[in-house]
Image: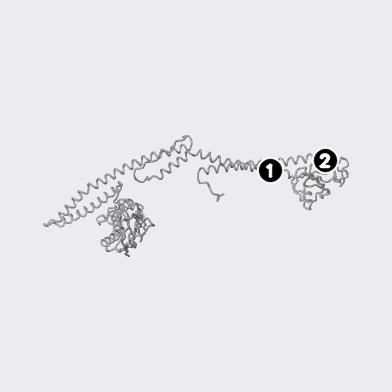
Amino acid sequence: MRHLPRPRTLRARLTFGLVVLLAVSCAAVGVAAVVELKGFLTGRLDQQLQQTGPSFPQSLEHGRPDTTKPSDHDGDEHGDTRRQAAATFGARLLNGEVTNVAVVPSHRHPGYDAPLTAADRRTLAALPADRAGHSVRLSALGSYRLMAWPGRDGDVLVTGLPIEPVRAAVHRLELVAGGVFGLALAAAGVAGALWVRWSLRPLSRVAATATRVSELPLASGEVTLPPRAPHSDPRGEVGRVAAAFNRMLHHVEDALTKRHASEERLRSFAADASHELRTPVASVRGHAELALLHPGPVPPEVTRALERIAAESARMGEMVDEMLLLARLDAGRPLERRPVDLTRLVLDAVTDARAAGPEHRWTLELPEEPVTVSGDVHRLQQVLANLLANARWHTPVGTKVRVSLEADGPTGVLLKVHDDGPGVPEDVQPGVFERFTRADRRRPETSGGGAGLGLSIVAAVTEAHGGTVELESRPGSTTFTVRLPLDRSPRGRSPRGGLSNG
């Protein structure tokens, strides 16, 4: 039973359970009917033997016919058979030995003789003279129901009737019951499947609604939930499930609406704040640089303060620009779309990174043919710059950084940035692409590190181009993988030869 395939759906399980229960009930009824019929017919045989009595065997006493009774076979040594049914068996035993045996002729046994084997004689000798029926199998005659009486001369008289009619009747009942129950099971299975399907229609509609809800992009943006599941009888289990599901959808829709409104307010605030901060930050930076250009003597403390103001102003300006870019991407503003030579962008980005971080070992692997994608060249350049800056800032001196560009099937391209540095901490990896996440906590804020927006910009820009970005990191191996779709337009195919640099 453990290896039998189990129904997967509730409808199939209910139908299967119904058919199994009906099959068990039919089997119980059939077995009870067969046992009862067999016992009833066997009892009738015993009654017939009781009514017949030992009259036939008595005519075999002393090996001569009973002349006190009329006989249709005058001179026949087998005695009077008028009261005996066809195939009736008779035997006389004296001192445990069979002395006389005879069988009333029938279509299966036309003669009176009944040849017995030694085993048959031992079986008859062991038969108790208790006037009760016993089922015995005789080699030449088959199965018989025998009954023994004690005789007048100290002998034992045995009379029997064949059990074959009982078995034939029982077998016929088994065939009829099997056919009727089989048809009943088939009809019940079909009717039960239709009934279960009709009964579970409300639950199927609830499942269909849940499936449509599960296919909606609930993670971001404004979401419109599908119509509620149809109402059914609230007194039933399915009705209660539908009502609870509809209430849950109402709460989910209300929560999503509030979340979307809150996100819109936050995005609007971030965009407005970033836009408004650009001017004062630029003004502070300009005044600081202007003060540094003063020709007169300036105390060293003032010079140091002005330099820090200029540096922090520049850093704040970059942060404001990054926040403004993220706000625009969140708002769904379309990016510029035109063919971009990604091979040239990667080559230029690695060249700039080598100049900014000469203490690292930079390697480059490019395909022989140029790779062209459709997108915003400035934003893709920012993705490359952020990934390489991340590898440069968060790895020690001497770290090897490998940048590779390879095909991702016929319609995509993979950009990988791999380093053999210490890796990203495991507790930081799940949120590494979230905003204001700093993977390297060892660097102080004054060291020039970013604000934790670089990788979030990489993820946002990549997603806006229809691609994905993934991280695989462990000590000694960290890989950022960017997947982008290729540009298949005719004008996006560059006739130039490929670049390769190892």
Report helix, strand or loop for mark 2.
loop
Q: Which mark is residue 172?
A: 1
Q: What element carries label 1?
A: helix
Number of residue marks: 2
Res. 360 visible in picture = yes
Whether tag 1 and tag 2 are in contact, CB under 8 A, the answer is no
Q: How is the image coloured?
A: one colour
Nearer the camera: disc 1 or disc 2 = 1
Q: Which residue is drawn at 48% across and 34% down?
A: 235
Observer able to see residue 93? no
> What amino acid is at disc 2?
Arg
Q: Which mark is residue 290?
A: none
Going by the image, does 187 lie left or right of 498? right
Cα gap from disc 1 to disc 2, whole angstroms: 30 Å
Looking at the picture, which amino acid does disc 1 mark? Arg
Q: Mark 2 points at which residue?
A: 82
Picture coordinates of residue 47, whole percent (x, y): 76, 39
| Residue drawn at 54 percent across, 41 percent down | 193
* 184 relative to 248 in the view: left or right: right
Q: Nearer the viewer, residue 466 or 8?
A: 466
